Image (spheres, rainbow, N blue to C red):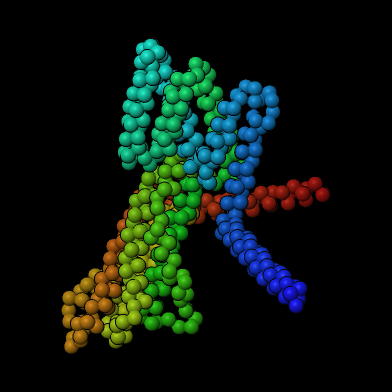
Amino acid sequence: MASSENQENVKGYSKSAWSWGKGYFEKIVNVVICVAKDAKKLGEEDPRRIVHSFKVGLAITLVSLFYYFDFLYEGFGVAAMWAVMTVVVVFEFSVGATLGKGVNRGIATLLGGALGVAAHRLASLAGENAESIMLGLSVFCISTLATFLRFFPKLKARYDYGLLIFILTFSLISVSGYRDDEVIEMAHKRLSTVMIGGAATALICIFICPIWAGEDLHNLTATNIEKLAIFLEGFGQEYFETRDDKHKVNKASLDGYISVLNVKGTEVNSAKWEPRHGRFRYRHPWGQYLKVGRSIRECAYRIDALNCYLNSEMQTPLEIRTKVKEPCTKMSSECSCALRELAKGLKTMTRAMSADPHIKKAKTAAKNLKSSLQTSLWPDTDLLDIIPAATVASLIVEIVSCTVKIADSVHELACLSKFKNPDAAIANEKGQGKVAVASDIQESHSVNVIVE
């Protein structure tokens, strides 16, 4: 009996262990599958992420050769590791961000190393007893001053990383020099390895599938304007219920403006570091994109308030909404057309003159709405029913003024960037087409001559 009970206990333990192991294995498999799906989604959203990962791996591999080969290792020694660290820290997604960090790190290493050597030399002149005190005071003063400079907004925007590396380099050189007499050699090796790592990073980032922050910023600005246009185009149909089955509005497309609210202008700082590329010249007015972005976000906040009335549970009666239907739909549709023209002009880098007539029509509709609101538009109507419709009308009028601000800032950007006029761009395309046709005719004529 005892032996049979022991066997049953063993079988029970083995079954429970098997079920536990099976469940644990299934959890691991599910985690791996989820991670694989997320990785696939990230790669499909932006394939450049995969390319960037390969570029970073290539740069680290090339720089690590200083550790693998003896004739390279003898020149730098353990300091060769600074080249690898430079690649890891400096290599960013875009060319502008990489160059900004690389320049900051190079200049900061040079200044920090030079100042560290100078502080060590001055402290050594004071004698052995006072040398440590002088070094401590210099580290305290320089670190305090450099840290305080990081709070200045302009310095923090572009040189915060450089100031951080300056503090690090100065502290390492000056403090470690107290126990090591070869301070100049130490600073030279550190600067050389940092320059080697930075140069390798910059070359790979620029010449192998470059990712330009300026181009991304330009395309993002145009896309954000287009998202506002999509909402305004569908709002009139949704709120006043004028849609039909043929022109049914996709609710998901109306929510595209939400991403505009969270856009930050960090790409501008990266774009300022980039050299001339593609359609963007030297000294391109990247700062103007901040002004355009502020106008876009201001309009997006008005649209967000407007969307609250679209999704509100307490809807205004349809007969009250119809009183302001015509001017409101006119304003929203004309603003949508104007924003689409502005986005198109940004994408093609041409002056969006065709947006001005739509803005004039929207202003006229806004004036008509204001004049009608001053009269008794809703006689014998409950005030609580009127307020939501009047608020919607007021918000659309504000959106018209926001559209005017966006148009002014985009026109200013087009003037500063020297965008082409639409007629000149069309003529240029036609001219290129004529040249291509003429070259084809000439080639066919020459072929006929040869055959004859």
Residue 331 location (% of width, % of height): 33, 70
Q: Give me the residue at 68% from left, 51% from top.
A: 440
Q: Give me the residue at 37% from left, 54% from top.
A: 293
Residue 162 location (% of width, % of height): 43, 34
Q: As rendered, which of 346 and 237 lies closer to the eye?
A: 237
Relative height, residue 426 to residue 277 (above, below): below
Q: Is residue 396 visible?
A: yes
Q: Give me the residue at 40% from left, 34% from top.
A: 163
Residue 198 location (% of width, % of height): 54, 33
Q: Is residue 267 left or right of residue 357?
A: right
Q: Quadrant of the N terminus?
A: bottom right
Q: Is residue 8 left or right of residue 323?
A: right
Given the current orientation, which residue lies at the most extreme right position? 452
Q: As rendered, which of 106 and 451 lies closer to the eye?
A: 106
Q: Is residue 207 visible?
A: no
Relative height, residue 196 to residue 228 (above, below): above
Relative height, residue 402 to residue 326 (above, below): above
Q: As rendered, which of 373 and 192 lies closer to the eye?
A: 192
Residue 218 location (% of width, % of height): 46, 51
Relative height, residue 92 to residue 382 (above, below): above
Q: Is residue 42 left or right of residue 334?
A: right
Q: Give me the residue at 65% from left, 25% from top.
A: 72
**Residue 210, quarter of picture:** top right
